[in-house]
Image (tube, coloured by chain):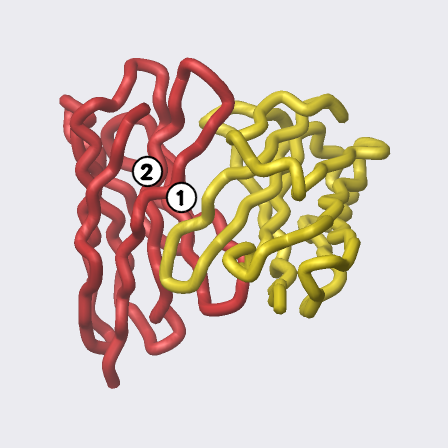
Amino acid sequence: LAKTTQPISMDSYEGQEVNITCSHNNIATNDYITWYQQFPSQGPRFIIQGYKTKVTNEVASLFIPADRKSSTLSLPRVSLSDTAVYYCLVGDGRDDKIIFGKGTRLHILP
Amino acid sequence: DTEVTQTPKHLVMGMTNKKSLKCEQHMGHRAMYWYKQKAKKPPELMFVYSYEKLSINESVPSRFSPECPNSSLLNLHLHALQPEDSALYLCASSRQTGPQETQYFGPGTRLLVL
């Protein structure tokens, strides 16, 4: 299984760009990298997914270097409502499991 | 409609009770999942159903019994639970199984076992 490592927590201020990096040294050839956001007492919500290079949607950007051993979730101009836990997931191409890492608790300050 | 619904929202049960958690989706998804989440921990996969058949059981104790009566419904039957089973139980669905498939999660059922 491709294990992921993320910072346990991060603080930032409203209006700043936040970058959360995830390490996944054992990523397999056909694994995708997916990020989810979870607010307290809610289910996780899909943010973005990528395989290589850069992916951007209306919420975030995902940067993946050529070796794919890490990825960076970029949240532009965060607000207080972006305070949540962010999970980096790497799919195990051998079966249908997706394993959540420990996540990063992002705290946005006014 | 991209919603996964779960009932009940909260459940308190004794160790001798039998109860069921329900999950429903109408997105035409053929994969459904049960996760368990303890406070300040990531969700842990319990079961995966693919086309109404159990495809993954993550060595979950038999006091948890999943059921998928049709492609829209997923149940989790609970019997003789222990206090350490208290957690948020999350249901999710996706078009199919596979790591590239986006999972849509319900709001969860918060379970307290006394």
Residue A96 at x, y = what percent?
A: 50, 23
The chain shown in red is which? A
User: Disc 2 marks which amino acid?
Assistant: Val
Which corner quadrant of the image does residue A79 belong to? Answer: bottom left
Residues under numbered marks 2 and 1 in contact, where contact means CB atoms less than 8 Å apart = yes
Q: Which residue position is annotated with label 1?
A: A48
Residue B82 at x, y = what percent?
A: 58, 56
User: Disc 1 marks which amino acid?
Assistant: Ile
The residue sitting at 32% across, 38% down in the picture is A55
User: Is residue A101 found left or right of A67 in the rendered image?
Assistant: right
Which corner quadrant of the image does residue B11 belong to? Answer: bottom right
The chain shown in yellow is which? B
Q: Pick whichever, A23 or A53, lies toward us.
A: A23
The residue sitting at 32% across, 26% down in the picture is A51
Q: Which residue position is annotated with label 2?
A: A55
Is B91 drawn above or below residue A43 in the view shown?
above
Q: Pick whichever, B100 or B15, lies toward us.
A: B15
User: Is residue A70 found left or right of A44 in the rendered image?
Assistant: left
- The kind of secondary structure element at disc 1 is strand
Q: Residues within 10 Å of mark 2 (few under 14, many from 20)?
A: some
What distance separates the C-alpha of mark 2 from that of mark 1? 8 Å
Residue A10 at x, y = what percent?
A: 19, 65
Q: Report the number of numbered marks.
A: 2
User: Is residue B30 found left or right of A65 in the rendered image?
Assistant: right
User: Is residue A93 found left or right of B33 in the rendered image?
Assistant: left
The residue sitting at 64% across, 53% down in the picture is B81
Is B15 drawn above or below residue A91 in the view shown?
below
Numbered disc 2: what chain?
A
Is A80 drawn above or below residue B109 in the view shown?
below
